[in-house]
């Protein structure tokens, strides 16, 4: 089995629980991972601390990169990272990616993933969307990215906020071709 080399970017949008669930699930999938690079903005740390009331992002064993570290391996396509998930993705970050503005490592990594025709999954977290947001989503989709809004599903009957967030994260990880037990409509209806 080919192992994933994955970039996770956490921006300052509300929805830190999605990022936490994503990192928790990646911990359980390490047998399918060659490398994980984490980018977390200062705003993302602030929002995490506000929403989750902790600094547990420091406890994950993945490599964290500074937002301006253009020497990070995934700043170049030659490092062969095969997917990137931005979770949650702020509209500002999405706008910069859509416009091709690579002014930090998150936007550069997204640019590399798109130019190399690899998987870019954006877990957009905003409501409502303006026409600017929708057009940015359209541009990224046309460039090969996948917009996966932070819109949970309910047919698995989630009982906690974490289970609810997992309905989105499971979809994103499936798009990156991870194999794991998850709810699948029509296969494990309760």
Image (cartoon, rainbow, N blue to C red):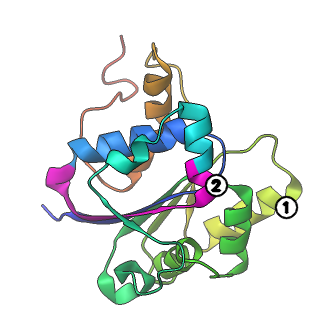
Q: Which mark is residue 132?
A: 1
Q: Nearer the viewer, residue 36 or 122?
A: 36
The outermost residue toward the right is: 131
Residue 17 image point, x, y percent? 51, 35
Among the two numbered marks 1 and 2 on one chain, the one whose residue lies closer to the N terminus: 2
Residue at the image point whose x is 28% and y is 50% from the top: 178
Q: Residue 37 lies in magenta, yes or no?
A: yes
Disc 1 element? helix
Q: Position of residue 106 (x, y in %)?
A: 54, 71
Residue 173 is left or right of residue 97, and the answer is: left
Q: Residue 57 placed where, x, y %?
A: 42, 47
The residue to which callout 2 is attached is 43
Q: Quadrant of residue 128?
A: top right
Give the CA distance from mark 1 to mark 2.
Answer: 22 Å
Q: Is residue 182 magenta?
A: no
Mark number displayed over residue 42: none
| In-image side of 174 versus 150 (left or right) | left
The quarter holding residue 93 reads: bottom right
User: Which stretch is magenta?
Assistant: 30-45
């Amino acid at each position: 089995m080919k192992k994933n080399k994955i970039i996770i970017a956490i921006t300052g949008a509300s929805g830190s629980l999605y990022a936490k669930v994503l990192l928790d699930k990646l911990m359980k999938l390490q047998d399918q991972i060659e490398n994980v690079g984490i980018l977390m903005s200062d705003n993302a740390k602030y929002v995490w601390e506000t929403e989750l009331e902790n600094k547990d992002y420091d406890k994950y064993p993945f490599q964290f990169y500074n937002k301006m570290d253009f020497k990070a391996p995934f700043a170049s396509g030659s490092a062969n990272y095969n997917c990137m998930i931005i979770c949650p993705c702020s509209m500002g970050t999405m706008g910069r990616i859509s416009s091709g503005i690579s002014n930090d490592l998150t936007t550069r990594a997204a640019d590399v993933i798109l130019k190399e025709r690899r998987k870019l999954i954006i877990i957009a977290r905003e409501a409502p969307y303006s026409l600017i947001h929708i057009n940015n989503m359209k541009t990224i989709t046309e460039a090969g990215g996948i917009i996966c809004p932070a819109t949970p599903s309910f047919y698995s009957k989630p009982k906690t906020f974490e289970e609810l967030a997992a309905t989105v994260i499971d979809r994103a990880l499936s798009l990156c071709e991870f194999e794991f037990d998850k709810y699948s409509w029509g296969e494990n209806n309760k």
